[in-house]
Amino acid sequence: MKPTGPIPPHFAAIDGRLFIGGVPAEELVEEAGGTPLFVYDNNIVGSQIARFKGAMADGIALHYSVSANPYEPLLEFLGRYVDGFRIVSLGELKRLQAAGLGGIPINFAGPGKLDHELEVAVKAGATISVESEGEAARTIRAGENAGIRPKISVRVTPPFAIEAGTVSIGARPSPFGVDAERVPMLVQGLLEAGVDWRGLHMFSGVQCLDASALSQIHRLTVAHAGEIAEAIGVPVPELNLGSGFDVACRPGESPLDIDHVAVSLNDTLCNAPSLLATTRFTIELGRWLVGEAGVYLTRVLDRTESCGHTFLTTDGGGHHLIGATGGLGERGLVNYPIALANRFDAPPEEAVTVTGCLCTPFDVLGDQVGLPRADEGDLIAVFCAGAYGLSASPQAWESRPVARELLV
């Protein structure tokens, strides 16, 4: 048997069955009309938001990164509790508007923004996080065309980053943001142009579970923002610290110590440079807020034997949850937490390989994982499926049906 990631602690068995949001998984499948199905538990999302706000110092704004999961009922739920949203496209803006969230603070980041997108976002009151001098100029023109003073922040390419959970120092080429030495001149130009300068956006960490590394990145980011403020000669209105918080979904991983991160960040902010004394701070979270709240449910279609190995073929696969397959190219490298939903508390009886329905040997949801005996019709549950699932997967692969989604 090969190890799997840890099943999040929020899920329990009642009468041997997996319950999600207080409802048996099989009943949720019936309610949704079948499998494959993503179920998102809003109680778990709410508890993550509460954990963040309870740990962090007052005044640190929490924004949700829509790219993590743009399911509109989930966005509507999040809009009641977060302080704003991060988007990277006009499509994500439209998702927020469809969910009735057009009036909440929005930060529009990411490279390659079209002129039309900039103008629509400016009209919607979003802050544009510009990634270059050229994009800044186009945003100013968009504001002129709309007759609106645009809100603009500058994304900085910092001379440090988290790579494989470790902080590395030194500038490196990047398509994201403006090199730090060019930021003061760009900001001076924005101020002279009369825009509503909203500050700096510095994103340095991705998918990190090491609280010490994240804490070091926060210290470096705040210090670097202070140096930029000194070069500009004015206080920074807002500093967006980005994200980087991951969830434990792979073998051997442990959850991020959010309390360690919070205590360290509070100390960093208490000792921040003087030109950041009145700065508003923001953290953008996606995966950490919703990743553990999602469960992917897929039905066993067939049980086969080959050369002494047992395969369970399901009606789902990597076209819905590509992360669990290792990117359809790294079979068995990931092994997300996986279980048999209708025998959730039963001990493993055999090692099986759980595959999807795609016509590729890389469509593997669980490689040689330990499960109770499973047969045709049984329900497989893959956990940590709430972020970068359906919307981040190749849904058009083989023209298969799109998975259903449900918020409970």
Image (tube, helix red, strand yellow):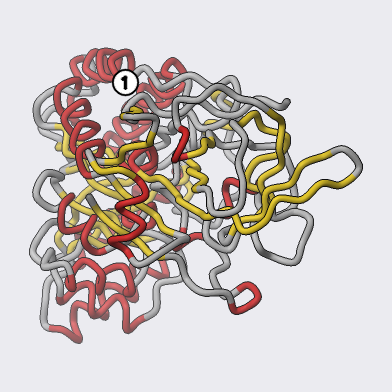
Relative placement, left or right, of 110 versus 225 is right
Residue ID at (60%, 53%): 376
Q: Disc 1 residue type?
A: Ile
Most extreme residue toward the bottom is: 145
Relative placement, left or right, of 385 versus 228 is right
Q: Is residue 233 visible?
A: no
Residue 267 in which image quadrant: top left
Residue 4 in which image quadrant: top right
Q: How many marks?
A: 1
Up-down relation of residue 88 to residue 249 (above or below)? below
Residue at the disc numbered 1: 258
Instruction: Give the SS element for disc 1.
Output: helix
Residue ID at (69%, 55%): 363
Up-down relation of residue 20 to residue 34 (above or below)? above
Q: In terms of depth relative to the viewer, which is nearer, 345 or 265?
A: 345
Residue ID at (33%, 74%): 91
Question: Where does residue 385 sit, x and y in percent of width and height?
Answer: 44, 46
Most extreme residue toward the right is: 307
Question: Where does residue 129 sit, x and y in percent of width and height?
Answer: 31, 58
Q: Quadrant of the N terminus?
A: top right
Relative placement, left or right, of 124 versus 311 is left
Dot 1 alpha-carbon crowd within 10 angstroms: few under 14, some 14 to 19, many 20 or more: some
Residue ID at (54%, 36%): 338
Q: Is residue 356 visible?
A: yes
Question: Where does residue 98 sit, x and y in percent of width and height?
Answer: 18, 73
Residue 17 in which image quadrant: top left
Question: Where does residue 163 sit, x and y in percent of width and height?
Answer: 59, 32
